[in-house]
Amino acid sequence: MPHGPARLFRLALAASFALSAALYFVWSWHWPLVGDASLIHYIAFLIQRGWAPYRQLGDMNMPGSFLIELAAMHVFGMNDLAWRLFDFTLLAAASAAFFILCHNPGAPFVTASSSRVGSNIGWLAALFSASLFILVHGRDGLAEGGQRDLTMAVCLIAATAFLFVAVRRNALWASAAFGLLSGLAATIKPTAILLTLIQVLIALQAARANRSNADGANQSNADRANQSNAAQAHVVILSNAKDPRISPRQWAASATAAYLIAPTIAFAFLLRWHALTTFLAGLHTVVPYYASLGHRPFSFVVMHSISPLLPLVLVWLTILALLRPHLDWERAALAAGVLFGLLNCIVQQRALPYYRYPLLVFLLPLMAIDFTRAFDSATEPGAPFATASSSRVGSTAAARALATLALAFAGFFLAPQSAVLIHRYRWWQTDFISTLQANLNALGGPALSGHVQCIDSISGCGNVLYRMRLEPSTGVLSDFLLFGAVSDHRPPDQIPIVASTRAQFAAAIAANPPQVIVVTSHLHIDGPDNFDKLARWPAFAQFLASRYTLRTEWAPTRTARWWSREETPASYRIYVLRPSP
């Protein structure tokens, strides 16, 4: 492709990427807080009201999830728009990291091909990565805003960007930033420490090579200067003295010290609420039980982890096979992130949309760099991937064609298609939330605080209590801990964590029966629906029948489109306590 048309092609791509990503912000700023994130938001609100995490509020999430939630609520506020601003901030941070990763103006120990990306069209690779990450997140729907895996992914990719700066510029502050963000990611999901350890080993090796080459270059310059005259040598030595090299030991110490900050804060958080013992017990009960539920087939998990990027991934793998690019340390650090993200999806086995974010934040820039390098070799003399060997000319030409096709598909089809899909989401259809809130207001509204109980997880009951600023009667907020899960074929009363949660819950509501109990129709993770979960605990069903009156049963009259598929919202029943005889 001649230079002029190639430049126009790049500009058209950039315009399409930028416009599509900008439309996500325009069309999603009024999305409500719903789904999984709303439950964690409610738990954070209860912690603000004095409820002890883990000890009074049973949950399987790590302390970092709640600490970040509390920090976001403090900075941005507590309404729906505040949560959108937090989501936008995460996407902006990821985008900034992509520009650092894809732009490298000739740093040491990076191949000539990678240095050309920074000097020529590294900006296009960064825009490719940022736009597609924003749009894939947007097309995942309303419920994925501010998800904990999104926060962890942004922490990890931002940490990697600081890692690159630390080695490229020999900057001690950047290594500390890498450690700080990596430690924060580990407080959300401790598995993140695996990626951090691998990246540290890769970067330390690069830092050692960087230092050795710098020392060798200094010595060579000094030798040449001595051969000419002593004055010139003196100037060279003074010039080098202005940029003293940081030893790998100093670099590692800085990163390690910063890494410990977030885990230390999390540990202090648990001590502050006297919840350390309960938290550690939950690691052996609630966490493994939750991890065992709702598993999907391996092939489904793998395919879903790269959806909707499958065509781009296939083209990228073909380009790698054709060109076999050199594995420099930066590429190795990104590849380690890709493998970690894929492993993260496979281990969790549920293929939920937000599970793939740690994979996408590393996969997208790696693909983008390779696509732009291969495309650049078609327009610039001596460009990356070009080769003098006639046996490789055909492979290079094929890679150029594939890279051009991939960029065109991403920029002119996938990005605008994603924006259109986002625009079609019916964010205003919150019938479950609006009707339940109206019904609870009719039953007392603020007076129900401390006297209302949801038998739900993420269908929306906790969301309504949060909007009304109502506290629950008990800290049991996840129904699968009361009824077990269908995928666990044991009788619920034979599941230890379910049996113990039932005993605590039954004692609490027997001692102080809630004035209102809201039961949603769906059992979290894998059903059943239609209130059939009540049959999984006959004693509780009998308690409702004997002590409560069914006041309201609501069922949706229309479907909702909060993501790529039409879905029927949950139904709910409202039970009101009968007067004592």
Image: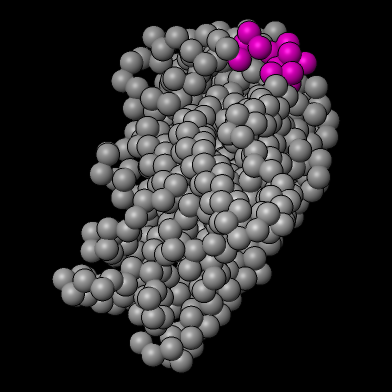
Quarter-of-image position of residue 249: top right
Q: Quadrant of the N terminus?
A: bottom left
Residue range in magenta is: 267-279
Colour scheme in the image? Answer: one colour
* Residue 531 screen position, x and y as percent: 46, 33
| SS assignment for the magenta stretch, majority | helix
Residue at the image point whose x is 48% and y is 68% from the top: 116
Left/right placement of residue 264 relative to residue 404 reads: right
Name above or below for residue 335 compared with residue 92.
above
Name above or below for residue 34 compared with residue 421.
above
Q: Is residue 271 magenta?
A: yes
Tally of numbered tags: 0
Toward the left, the furthest residue is: 391
The answer to whether residue 143 of the structure is visible from this angle is: no
Left/right placement of residue 480 relative to residue 26 reads: left
Q: Pick whichever, 361 or 531, lies toward us.
A: 361
Quarter-of-image position of residue 372: bottom left
Residue at the image point whose x is 25% and y is 44% from the top: 299
Q: Quadrant of the C terminus?
A: top right
Left/right placement of residue 268 relative to residue 489 reads: right
